[in-house]
Amino acid sequence: MPRPKKAVVKSKKAPVKKAPAKKTAPKTAKAKKAPVAKKAPAKTSARVAALVATNDKAAAAAQAQLDKATARADKAADKLAKASAAAKTKGEMAKAKPTAAKKAAAAKARTAVADARAALSAEKKLVKEARVQLKGVQAMASKATTAARVVANAEAKIDAAMAKAVAKIQAKADKQIAAIQKKAAKDIARSEAAAVKSAQQKKRRKPRKKAAPAPAASPAPAQVAQS
């Protein structure tokens, strides 16, 4: 006997629950920010020229300061020379006839010489500082002048290159425009020639004559009975 078939138990698939669709708010176009007006950058040569002018002004001021310091140092040197001469004279007088007053005058003269020497040393120091400052300012002015020359040359090259590029683009555009105009003229001439040819062909064609209708058949004459 055949074996009984086992009942196949089909497993039911669980219904897939769909996630509720998320409600998305309609996208609103973002408001574009108004373009901020940018200041046009000053030309490099103008900035360098301003720097050169500033450095020249600083160099002139440093030179004036050095001149003043040198003048003060010269005065201090003259004062020291006079004080030294006076001290020498008073010292000799005190040695010749030593008195308390002459000794005091000689000591005072020596003090004046020391003060004059200290003043001269201070003025010389100021002169040295002014000279160093002037040298630094002059070096900066020289660099600025060199930079101005380099920048001017670079800008001249850039302007020339831009002019050349613009001329090249203009020439290319002119060539393209000329080609387009030439093609358009050819197309117009071709269409006009075609129109003329078509008109001529229409004129040459003769209208066909319609065939004349065939005449109707006349009835046969009755035969006269012979007597």
Image (spheres, helix red, strand yellow):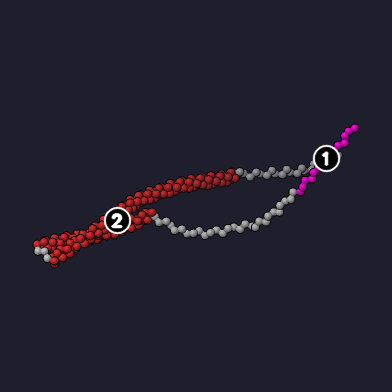
What number is the disc on residue 133? 2
Q: Is residue 168 left or right of residue 191?
A: left
Residue 41 image offset from top left, x and y in percent: 42, 56
Residue stretch in magenta = 1-15
Task: Tell me which residue sits at (26%, 55%) in the image.
Answer: 128
**Residue type, numbered disc 2:** Gln
In this view, the residue in front, 139 or 106, is: 106
What kind of residue is marked 1? Answer: Val
Location of residue 197 with respect to 29 vertically, above or below? above
Eyeballing the image, is 137 above or below 100?
A: above
State the residue in front, 208 or 150.
150
Q: Is residue 205 above or below residue 70?
A: above
Left or right for 159, reference 57: right
Q: Which residue is mark 1?
A: 8
Q: Which SS type dominates the magenta stretch?
A: loop
Mark sitting on residue 116: none
Badge 1 element: loop
Horizontally, residue 171 falls left or right of residue 68, namely right
Of residue 193 and residue 106, the one placed in the foreground of this image is 106
